[in-house]
Amino acid sequence: MKRKVAILGSTGSIGTQAIEVIQEQKQHFEVELLAAHNNAELLIKQAIAVQPNAVVIGNEDKYLMVKEALQPHDIKVFAGAEALEQAVTMEGIDVVLTAMVGYAGLKPTLAAIGAGKQIALANKETLVVAGELVTALAREKGVNIYPVDSEHSAIFQCLAGEFDYTIKNGTAVEKIYLTASGGPFRGKDNAFLSTVKKEQALKHPNWEMGAKITIDSASLMNKGLEVIEAKWLFGLKAEQIDVIVHPQSIVHSIVQFVDGSMKAQMGLPDMKLPIQYALAYPYRLPASFPRFDFINYPSLTFEKPDTKTFRNLAIAFEAMRVGGNMPCIINAANEVVVESFLKDKIGFLEMSDVIEACMQKASFVKTPTIDDYVASDKEVRALAYEMIK
């Protein structure tokens, strides 16, 4: 087995760790394409190190810089969103790791699926925004979507070998539990949260992640988005998905079956494991990742999430129940409020206020097309920015 991989979002947290995995497993993988939006300097370093066939820089203003730097290395260079959508369809690519942040990952993921590429999905927003459309296209094209998020990878690993694991006939899986660390503000009340700053929110207790996903983790929106993603990945109903707070982040998620038995996938918090599992599936490759030792964790604890204080989780469940373009609406609003919070333009608790207001004001579409998703994303961003300024 030697798979040629495209990494979308190569300069982010998942992308950089994916390159480390590939370099450690050179006999099994090689990089065919690297893509980044703005970090041209790191993209150039990565390309020189792994020698892909091509790179794409999203920011077209940095095209010449990247092209001149990589010209001596005989690496093709492209720029812009449309170029990325075309590049992921290249014949030499076997699997596309979508690790871009936010809504921007939707169109290139759809393009890759349309070209019959297998998908290692780290961009949860793709399924949050357009889960029905994406999964329908994947079925049509015979494309597998392998989850990279640690929680969804855990569910996927627990389902391996289980008959009818997509529960098409209402069998096998009774319920899944997605675990959440609780973030840096677990147990805090509204009085405390009303004063927190981005520096506090960016200090996640267990995981090293990018700024956007770290803020989402602090507000529990990340877990809410994961709930919606799980619905589409595993063909579940809202009542079959639950969230449980597990501060140690050792149990990554749990499947409960119709006979009452449960499976949990465990391990130290390390994104390299789910990245490797998604890229190598159905094989398990030997790796030098740190090993879990029960003696170091004499107590594993579990709590019910506080959805009254951390409203974003309840918001996400409601959006999933409503369906249509409502998950797209909350995703667009959330991307705006997180960006604004990171720029000190909005308070931590106010993020949920804006998202809820957008749910009330934005145009609702029960059976959206791709054009509806694009229009909805644009409309909601404008609404959210108007509320914040």
Image (cartoon, grey):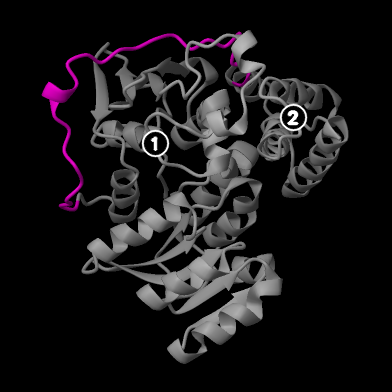
Identify the residue at horizontal 59%, vertical 20% (top origin).
Answer: 317
Identify the residue at horizontal 30%, vertical 32% (top origin).
Answer: 159
Q: Disc number at residue 346? A: 2
User: Of residues 134 and 19, which is closer to you in this image?
Assistant: 19
Is 308 situated above or below 105? above
Q: Secondary structure at mark 2?
A: loop
Q: Residues within 10 Å of mark 2 (few under 14, many from 20)?
A: some
Which quarter of the figure is the C terminus placed in? top right
Picture coordinates of residue 188, whole percent (x, y):
53, 11
> Mark 1: which amino acid?
Trp
Q: Secondary structure at mark 1?
A: loop
For residue 196, side relative to residue 96 (left or right): right
Identify the residue at horizontal 40%, vertical 44% (top origin).
Answer: 148
Please say if the residues under marks 1 and 2 sit with CB atoms less than 8 Å apart: no
Q: Which residue is mark 1?
A: 207
User: Of residues 386 and 26, which is closer to you in this image?
Assistant: 386
Picture coordinates of residue 14, whole percent (x, y):
43, 51
Q: Residues within 10 Å of mark 1 (few under 14, many from 20)?
A: some
Inspect the magenta stretch and tell me whether residue 306 lies in it.
Answer: yes
Q: State the extent of the magenta-drawn residues as a range.
A: 285-312
Inspect the magenta stretch and tell me whether residue 362 lies in it.
Answer: no
User: Of residues 291 and 363, which is closer to you in this image?
Assistant: 291
Earlier in the chain: of badge 1 and badge 2, it is: 1
Picture coordinates of residue 266, whole percent (x, y):
24, 29
> Mark 2: which amino acid?
Ile
- Residue 333 picture quarter: top right
Q: Disc number at residue 233? A: none
